[in-house]
Amino acid sequence: MQATKTKRVLVIEDEALVGMMIEDFLGDFGYAVVGPIENLESAIFLAATEEIDVAVVDINISGQVATAVADKLIERGIPFLFVSGYEKMRGARYASIPLLRKPFEPEDLRDAIERVLRR
């Protein structure tokens, strides 16, 4: 039987406690976590270069909208979802990107990532 590759998840979240919580949840579900990344410059770089399977992207990173991160992921064909306590990202380019509203339960995160990976 062939071993399945552990999925690598890029986590972009500027609130340290929320980032650690997401990291813990994903680790418990068997994912390998890259991050959490707390600043936009590093997030853009990793979205453009890191070997990842999926990403969890907070819409608001230290007061800046994460459109450049989303655009890099879209360009690379990497599935992702937004997390936010706010409204969904505006613009037709992001209309099909799922949004997981904060606060959420661990199972909500797991289910959202599984749905994104199946797309």
Image (cartoon, rainbow, N blue to C red):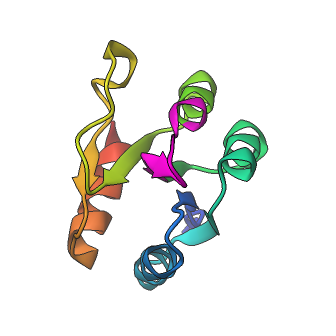
Quadrant where the N terminus lies? bottom right
Q: Is residue 91 magenta?
A: no
Which residue is found at the position 78% from the left and 41% from the top?
Answer: 49
Location of residue 3 with respect to 83 vertically, above or below: below
> Can you give x and y, in whole percent of width and height, for residue 63 in the image?
50, 49
Q: Is residue 42 left or right of residue 58?
A: right
Q: Is residue 59 magenta?
A: yes
Location of residue 108 with respect to 98 vertically, above or below: below
Q: Quadrant of residue 97?
A: top left
Which one is in front, 90 or 45?
90
Which one is in front, 24 or 20?
20
Task: Write the start and end of the magenta stretch as one range.
Answer: 57-69
Quadrant where the C terminus lies? top left
> Can you give x and y, in whole percent of width and height, for residue 33 in the image?
59, 69
Which one is in front, 50 or 6?
50
Location of residue 69 with respect to 15 vertically, above or below: above
